[in-house]
Image: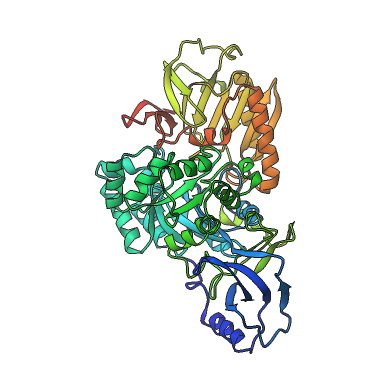
Amino acid sequence: MLEQRYRWKNKHLRDQVSVLDGKLAPTILLKNAKYLNQTFRKWMTANIWIYGDRIVYVGDRTPDLLEHTEIIDCSNYLLVPGYIEPHAHPFQLYNPHSFARYASQFGTTVLINDNMALMLQLEKKKAFSLLREMRNIPSTMYWWCRFDAQTELQNEEFTFSHSEVKSWLEHDAVLQGGELTGWPRLLDGDDLMLHWIQEAKRMRKQIEGHFPGASEKTLAKMMLFGADCDHESMTGEDVFNRLMQGYTVSLRNSSIRPDLAKLLDEMHEIGITTYDKCMLTTDGSSASFYEQGIIDQMIRIAIEKGVPIIDAYNMGTVNVAKYYNIEYLHGNIATGRVANINFLTEETNPTPVSVIAKGKWVKREHQVVEDAYQPINWRENGLDPLEINWELTMDDLQFSMPFGIQMENAVITKPYSVSIDASYDELPHTHDECFFMLIDRNGKWRINTILKGFASKLSGFVSSFSNTGDLILIGKNKADMMTAFKRMKEMGGGIVAAENGSIVQEIPLPLKGAMSAQSVEELIEVEKQLLTYLKVKGYRFADPIYSLLFFSSTHLPYIRITQRGMYDVMNKMVLFPSIMR
């Protein structure tokens, strides 16, 4: 549990009231502030008093005591609440700390985060220690509690045991259960998952769905089971069907599903003109997708697509806060709320020039406040470099599977019959088939096959970034695959490409082999370099990071490579088991 049971201790509350009584001075006074008042749905002018991390007054009054108060004349700005990302996956090479810092520069100061990587990579005590440390940064970090691994784990009953899930659900920083990537199990009679949903509802926490392509009947069933929201709408009709069944809908614009503009066009075509049950999410996009912004960019798209300006801002702020029952803390500029405020120059440009998060400046007049986010000791929180104390041998690189995996797009994979002779140490560059291996990070098992459609000229490629933290090897040349593996091992985890015995691309991932310690700005550049390299080698899709992540993800069709072996998603069966080493 978090050490601090309440958001503010009694002494803090007494001090905040003392500011109104003139016994203490506010830390910041925002004078003549034209701000978005979501109660009256209009722009209003007031003085905003901030003490510590909280707004203690909004109105016409000025403080009686101004000793050491920072006074800002806001006549030239428009103020809106800090934006809220309701569905973050803060482990897409970047880490929760670096992503929170980066997002704050675009005004997104509250993140509601996936806990999958923490459940798979850390013991519970270390994970909760990290959550506690995340409480000290200017961004506000909330979390989900997963109910399934979205893959076939060898020991899922331990990772997602009742005691583990219940501990996460009870955690103060956890606002919801889900997302329900394992919902077919629920429909098939999984009463343990249903019990966890019931527990979440008992605790007044929300349930996030994951229902791509779901029929109206399935949506109704899942609503009866307890789902509250879904982010998988791909058409305006999908949005309509979810709203009809009582869902809140997260409209998505992500690196693999950049759908927002299309969704809004189709919503307007079928007559959806109210937005109170809609939110905005970027759904854990790759770093380079965020170059133009986070929720601010989505608000901009919404405004450009004809959403009324106040509704557009509400979808990124108060709608989210209301849905998660945290409106008393977030989502609007009003007395009692956490002091998360964005300073704009015009209402049609939601990217802020200055940002206050928890009462601290994190951006001022377009400039990053460098010391706002203090570094984290990752090792103390269990996120040390990957230690691989075993050797990969040429005997491991045997590929005789009768069928392989064919990529339909960046994330959908189908089975296909292997017709090439894969007994050689190198495959020709005249086709797009590569050797493909998933191997246990502890060296206990492996599964080998052929991957079609990833690249045609890729010699050796290794990634410790994957859904489960196991190791992915892809390539045409076994020797270069070995070279890339050795370099990844030396780095303590990462993504490495090798050619002719030399390393040509690398992204170090020293946090358990899953995350970078670099800033998101730095990561954007190296990620773009990797994409450019892979495209030269024949990669045809938009997002190789998500390709790596989803090779083993059984919430997507049709065939996956998992810890248990080659897995047929539609028939829910292992086709070829993994091989013990």
Please give the name of the residue rendered at 51% of the width and 46% of the height, measured from the top-left corner: 283
The image quarter in which residue 171 lies: bottom left
Would you say residue 210 is visible in this rendering?
Answer: no
Residue 290 can be seen in this image: yes
Quadrant assignment, res 154 = top left
Q: What residue is drawn where x is 33% and y is 49%? A: 244
Can you give x and y, in whole percent of width and height, for residue 325 in the image?
43, 65
Apparent side of residue 556 relative to residue 4 in the rendered image (left or right): left
State left or right for residue 559 relative to residue 295: left
- Considering only vertical position in the picture, is 15 above or below 340? below
Tell me which corner region of the image, top left, top right, bottom left or bottom right, holds residue 166. bottom left
At 68% from the left edge and 49% from the top edge, which residue is drawn?
A: 519
Against 41, residue 64 (above or below) is below
Residue 548 horizontal/vertical position (percent): 53, 34
Coloring scheme used: rainbow
Where in the figure is residue 182, as x and y percent of width and height? 36, 42
Question: Is 181 placed left or right of 57 in the picture?
Answer: left
Residue nearest the viewer, comparing 508 with 139: 139
**In the image, residue 291 lies at what x, y percent?**
66, 44
Closer-to-camera residue (344/402): 344
